[in-house]
Image: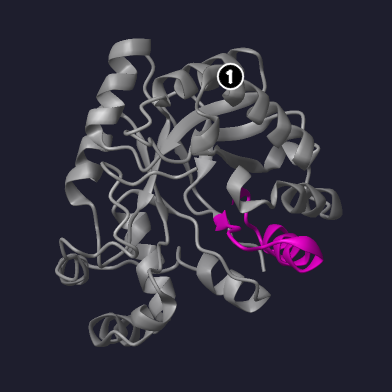
Amino acid sequence: MNIEIPEIALNDGNRIPVIGFGTYRLKGNDGATALQHAINNGYRLIDSAYNYENEGTVGEAIRRTSVPREQLKITSKLPGRYHKYQDAVTTIQESLYRANLDYYDLYIIHWPNPKQDLYLEAWQALIDAKRWGLVRSIGVSNFLPEHLERLEKETGVLPSINQIELHPFFNQEEQRKWHEEQGIVTESWSPLYRASDVFENDTLNEIALKHGKSISQVVLRWHYQIGAVPIPKSSSPARQLENLSIFDFSLDDGDMKTIASLSRPDGRLNDQDPAEYEEF
């Protein structure tokens, strides 16, 4: 099954697919096998992180697949404990060594850690890493507009991507609008929320039945139609294909409004507010 995935342009001229594959907790041989299936099933945007401890697993999956490296878009993330400039540079290098890659297509700061207040140093390290050819595009994750404005003010460079918690129960409408105005692509982590909660939701089930699709396909199609790039994860090859099969139907305005109504102010999964939360 060959699914053609559209691409979206970044503000630096590079392009990424409009849906990717998450790798959190995918490790070792089982993780590499799941990733190999995902790549063979058509995923080209692969999301990992230094703190996931699976950059080596990602690299192994790349070596196992017959898909050329230049067709893949590989992401990793800088952890909070390495925000100091030289630490960040060294960590980016270590990320490359772990995966046995010559470059990352996208490298991002995992959390701003505002209490630590070193994310400007980390951002300068990413800017330099891009200039040196270690990474192709640079971005952030979980940054609020106030953090992003500071990056631009101090360095003149806005991220290409901000990866944020985004799902029907926390749709981040204002943040997404701000990103759009600034030319930043929104990427969605935990796009399906908790699968058990999503799959038992009557409202989403009604929309899925209406379109003859699964609930996960409806939710991922919703992400696509609001302009966000979701990165769902699944070890099942069948589910991987299901999650990619979102380009042969559309949600109408009523569907979109109904899904928008599910969002709530306290909808975060683990109450991780980027204004306070610290990740190391």
Is 37 situated left or right of 217 in this image?
right
In the rendered image, which quarter contains the N terminus? bottom right
- x and y percentages locating residue 172 in the rendered image: 23, 52
Residue on which disc 1 sits: 130
Is 91 situated left or right of 66 in this image?
left
Is 20 situated left or right of 205 in this image?
right
Asked whether residue 34 is drawn in magenta, I would say yes
Asked whether residue 158 is drawn in magenta, I would say no
Q: Which residue sits at x=72%, y=32%? A: 94
Let me know if residue 48 appears in the view. no
Q: Which residue sits at x=22%, y=69%? A: 259
- x and y percentages locating residue 2 in the rendered image: 65, 63
Is 137 situated left or right of 189 in this image?
right
> In this picture, which residue range is highlighted in magenta?
21-47
**Of residues 82 and 203, the one drawn nearer to the viewer in this rendering:** 82
Dividing the picture into quadrants, the one containing residue 99 is top right
Mark 1: give few (<14), some (14-19) or many (20+) Cα within 10 Å.
Answer: some
Q: Which residue sits at x=72%, y=51%? A: 58
